[in-house]
Image: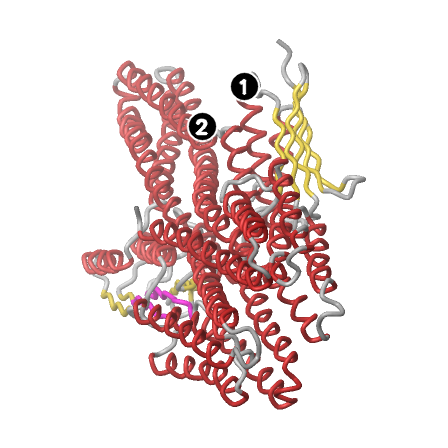
Amino acid sequence: MTLRQERSSVSRRLAYVVISVVFVGYFSNAFLYVLQAGATPVRIAGSLACLLSIGYLQLRVFSRPGTDLRSAKAYLALGALALLVFVPMLFFPNAWAGMPGFFAGSALLVLPGRVRWLVFGAVALVNAAAKIGQWETGVLIYYLVSSMVAGLVVYGLSRLPSLVKQLETVRSELADLAVSQERLRFARDLHDLLGFSLSAITLKVELTRKLIGEHTDRALRELAEILGIAREALTDVRAVASSYRELSLADEIESARSVLTAAGVTATIEADETELAPRSRTVLATVLREGVTNLLRHSEATRCTITISGTDGFVSIDVVNDGAPAEAGTDQGSGLTNLATRTTALGGSILAQASPDGVYRLHAEVPTDPASEERASDPRPAGPMMATRFAQVLLTAVVVGYGAMATTLSTHFYSSVGAAGIAAAAVSSAVAVGLVLGLVSRPHVRLTPVRVGAVLAALAVCVYTAPFVFTNPYLGAVPGFLAGSAALLLPRRTGWLAFVAVVAAQGAIYHVMGPSIGEGVVDTVYGVIAATNHGLVLYALTRLRSTVNELHEAREELATAAVTQERLRFARDLHDLLGYSLSAITLKSELTHRLAVIDPGRARQELTEVLEISRQALADVRSVALSYRELSFDEETQSAQALLSAADIEVTVRIDACDQLPKEVTVTLATVLREGVTNLLRHSKAEHCEIVLASSRHLVTMDIINDGIPTIERKSRDGSGIGNLTTRVRALGGDLQAGLTPEHTYRLRAEIPLPLN
């Protein structure tokens, strides 16, 4: 198990422990108030049965990862929970005041769309309305806010473990998606660079074989063209293979120094030790290699200066020599065009220019970390970003809610503490909320030990000043903020010892001050339970949010690693399959060129072998390209479901049996499905998506329908886009349509006719 997998597993276990402790805290507090109101056997048995049933439903249904919360079972469980929450309120009105939060939170988990928020708000209003006539306005507001906060706590603690698990799944899916996109690019490179060249060689070899002996001069011209095409193709293979291997900039610098010195060129090389991402390092190494290669091939330089320096997030390379080529702007070999494509893909630039005094300068600039540039401008897929935003918003809402609860509860004691006491409680709560949200719960804020001590001391002042000044434990900031912050900021063992100390101190404070206000033992137990629950909720939501952030950031790393592996495999395939073949074609064509006049029979024999090699090489190109190009519709469907579910998009899939469909049809449909889902995640805010594949004897149709209208129409990054999809579908005689429907949904529809049997 890797460190990151272990951390994810620990996070899920932590969530289960915290959920259990927090829920037990709610149940224990309710049971104590039941006992206080009258401990008869019937009341004890009835309340325990209801509380245990609520706990079972919450832990075994609503909080369990993998549970289908849109199923009939979930709706039945929600109905049962409603009865367990609201019916006992007729018998235990005060003791059951905290239970509506369980129904409110579970409604957020189970019900769809806006309905869940309407039910959530209605539950909070009903809980507060039930206390009208019993309490003053401030306490009614307390009950309103406490129901909402309890609902958010139940919702968050139940939802976050599932989100962490979904993120683990989506990491793998996104890495696979990145690899698949890279495979498609490999296929295009193979087809564009080598398909035409090998086809041309095959045709010209067949023609030349017929011409030898009768039209020798023309045969020699054809052989010269074959040689040119073969050499260019071999160069292309090496260029493509090289472009998929990570290059070492340090190795390229040493190679450049050695080559230039051997050629009699005085080399001056200056390089900063700038930390570079692998992609930037590879591009700079490629620019250096190309610059030195062109210098040796196309100039008569005697001096060359190579300078590599970094500033403000960018690193630049300058290759300057005193032998400007005759055609400075001409593309040679892989050339400036390919270099420009690679640098601009990273957000960089390249410039080549010759001055009148014969100095030639090649300048390139790329970001030190192109991934960070992409993260700054890239609209992330909805699933991981939704999890991150959800965790942040949830934590903020709960912390602010706890602060509001402490302030509104203090108004109940206005007669004994006056306006000064209420003001002190309000200011203490506000400052504590600011410290928790601004410093304690921020995942990227690193506090020194001195600042940790200062933050905890400030929280202790907020928690304890008002209670001791006004002799009332219900005033001041939320004690759980101090307990949870100690567990978060201090070393593990020290932090949890401090957590226990704060909780114990709170019990002691309520024991000393509570009886003068009301409830004795109940007050003491309430103080312990409240401090424990609030501290654990703060700790859990902060830790789980940090874990979500870490898993989210790991997406780029994993996808990049997967793509790098695929590139290396492709480079090996390309070299092993085509390097030998093209070298053999070149050598045998050179031999044939020499034999054409002196031994036509032998020349024909050599051309026959060249023809066989070229045909085999063309078959190899098609084989490699096909292996990178073929997609599985079943795998794409499963990937789409995983990605959409992780993005919190409700997905419905209805697929007719597609086993009997021609392979080219399923590959095209898989491509359309991938592009449709990718565009949905990038460019819309959908909540529901429906994928339907229907086939008849003569036609197969696929619809991807969602309720999120795209914010912008644009092509995806790999350039396939709607235009290329349309081309692929029409190549099979079909049609592709994308646009709004009368039901105000967005539909991507592909129709492909099936061949007659």
Q: Determine whether 291 is above or below 235 in the image.
A: below
Say which of 397 and 151 sits in front: 151
* Cα separation between marks 2 and 1: 19 Å
Say if mark 2 contacts mark 1, CB within 8 Å.
no
Residue type marked 1: Asp
Where residue 602 sits: x, y (%)? Answer: 26, 16
Residue type marked 2: Leu
Q: Quadrant of the C terminus?
A: top right
Counting residues from the N terminus, which is met first, the one under dot 2 or under dot 1? 2
Residue with the most extreme front position: 40
Looking at the image, which residue is at 33% across and 63% down? 323
Q: Nearer the viewer, mark 2 or mark 1?
A: 1
Task: Look at mark 2 in the image and give the residue it sits on.
Answer: 626
In the image, the segment drawn in magenta is: 305-321
Q: Is residue 528 left or right of residue 700?
A: left
Binning the other alpha carbons within 10 Å of mark 2 as few (below 14), some (14 to 19) or many (20 upward) gives some
The prevailing secondary structure element of the residues shown in magenta is: strand
Where residue 149 sits: x, y (%)? Answer: 60, 63
Q: Determine whether 420 is above or below 517 in the image.
A: below
